[in-house]
Amino acid sequence: MARLKDKYLSLKPQLQEKLEIKNPMQIPAMEKVIISVGTGFAMKDNKLIQNIQDTISQIAGQHASVVPARKSVAGFKVREGMPVGVKVTLRGAKMYEFMDRLISIALPRVKDFRGVPRNGFDGRGNYNFGLTEQLIFPEVDYDSIMQIHGMNITMVTTTDSDKEAFALLEAFGMPFAKGRDNG
């Protein structure tokens, strides 16, 4: 079992008590993690898009897919079907493994890291934040990188409350920036 899932199972009673939840089925849990990269800078370079796809696949431990444009936008020189992004959705054991590596290995490697922002909650219990480079993950081979790029990470929870989602992520050990309390 993933280390972080084991930790979650042991923290469930404390979360239930802290959030004053009567029904144990209402205790917030992680549903999925989505890693995405916008590749607008590399639309016409198939080798670069393939490189980004391979990098994200290494980081996630699961095959990433290229996202095509849904419709043409002349102002951005985008045609329908052109690759505009790369994404991967993680669930279950792979999600917990990725979160564990993110929290314990990757985020501490960020230069001048002061914590992830507290204002990344969307009002529905989901948390979004961005990373500026993929090199903080130990799986990435420096020699195979063609261009440094960032990524967006979305953590979807089973709750609709930002306060409960914050408590869940804080229990997992997510290093939030110091400042005012969320919720």
Image (spheres, helix red, strand yellow):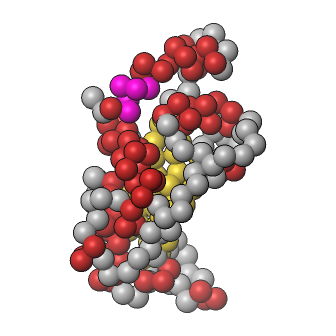
The dominant secondary structure in magenta is: helix
Residue at 55% across / 76% down in the picture?
71
Establish if 94 lies above or below 159: below
Residue that extends furthest to the front in the rendered view of this protein: 112
- How far from the left and from the top, in percent, is residue 21? 64, 15
- How far from the left and from the top, in percent, is residue 37? 46, 67
Q: Does the image show residue 51?
A: yes
Residue at 44% across / 74% down in the picture?
149
- How far from the left and from the top, in percent, is residue 115? 57, 51
Going by the image, does 150 lie left or right of 126? left
Quadrant containing the N terminus in the rendered view: top left
Establish if 126 lies above or below 24: below
**Is 5 contained in the magenta span?**
yes
Residue span colored magenta: 4-8
Going by the image, does 160 lie left or right of 157? right
Q: For this rendering, which residue is in front, 145 or 31?
A: 145
Q: For this rendering, which residue is in front, 159 or 14?
A: 14
Going by the image, does 70 lie left or right of 59? right
Establish if 12 lies above or below 124: above
Residue at 63% across / 49% down in the picture?
177
Q: For this rendering, which residue is in front, 83 or 153?
A: 153
Residue at 48% across / 21% down in the picture?
11
The number of numbered badges drawn on the structure is 0
Going by the image, does 162 lie left or right of 24? right
- How far from the left and from the top, in percent, is residue 167? 61, 31
Find residue 175 and report its image quarter: top right
Establish if 96 lies above or below 171: below
Quadrant containing the C terminus in the rendered view: top right
**Is 173 contained in the magenta span?**
no
